[in-house]
Image (cartoon, rainbow, N blue to C red):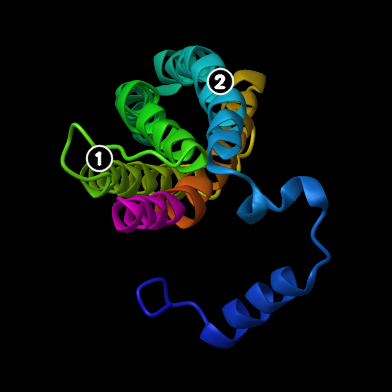
Amino acid sequence: CQEKKADIAIVQAELDEIDNRPARAAENYEAWELDVLIDHIVGVHHVYIKKSNPTIKEFVNRVKLVHGMNKPNVSEISDRFDALATELEQHLHKEEQILFPYIKQMVQAKKMGTSISAPFGTVQNPINMMLAEHDSAGNELEALQQLTEDYVPPKGACATHKVSYGQLKEFADDLMQHIHLENNILFPKALALEKELSEMG
């Protein structure tokens, strides 16, 4: 709150309001098994990124070509999104090929009552890497939010410009939910499961 110059009382009141809302069963991610949560993250959020990346790139690059000379921020928006998209493609690949399969193996090991050892020492190692990459993606989102002035197109913006800002906003909202599910639910539970399995073994 200090860093963002936000009123802590207002933020706390908003958080309390969220806590007091009745949660729909479908949104109670805390109760989901880790393999189910992983399938949800991949099937919803990873698929969304893979589908939307090329479309958003095309729109922001088109805006850059048309307006880049007069509005330098649109060039930076395009360049930053291109870099973020490339970063995320590599990030998703690492999660899908290394971290997520291992977490699923831990879930199976617990069900079967068997032991398992991580090829990377401990699940903490790839999680640390994913957390650092999430921080980097979050910083890029923050920069995009500032460059677009909260995704509000400038007065007189053409249709392509407006659509690109709308797409960026949707992308940012989805990515924040995606990061929340991993950082605050999946990763802590995976670490707890690894600890539980090591105590069993």
Q: Which residue is mark 2?
A: 47
Q: Nearer the viewer, mark 1 or mark 2?
A: 1
Please tell me which of labels 1 and 2 falls first in the chain: 2
Q: Is residue 192 magenta?
A: yes
Closer to the camera, 31 or 106? 106
Q: Which residue is mark 1?
A: 126
Work out how far the residue at label 1 is from the one at label 2, CA to CA, in angstroms: 21 Å
Q: Residue at x 19, y 31 (%)?
A: 119
Q: Is residue 195 above or below residue 49?
A: below
Q: Is residue 29 above or below residue 99?
A: below
Identify the magenta region. 188-201
Q: Amino acid at mark 1?
A: Pro
Q: Amino acid at mark 2?
A: Val
Closer to the camera, 102 or 139? 102
- Which element is circle 2 on? helix
Q: Are marks 1 and 2 in contact (CB under 8 Å)?
A: no
Q: Is residue 76 toward the left or the right of residue 61 in the image?
A: left
Asked whether the viewer can see residue 70, the reply is no
Instruction: Find residue 130 and report its horizontal and vertical position in percent.
Output: 30, 41
Instruction: Find residue 123 and report its horizontal and vertical position in percent.
Output: 27, 44
* Residue sitting at the far left: 121
Q: Is residue 119 toward the left or the right of residue 53 in the image?
A: left
Provide the major secondary structure of the magenta segment. helix
Instruction: Find residue 135 and report its horizontal and vertical position in percent.
Output: 32, 49
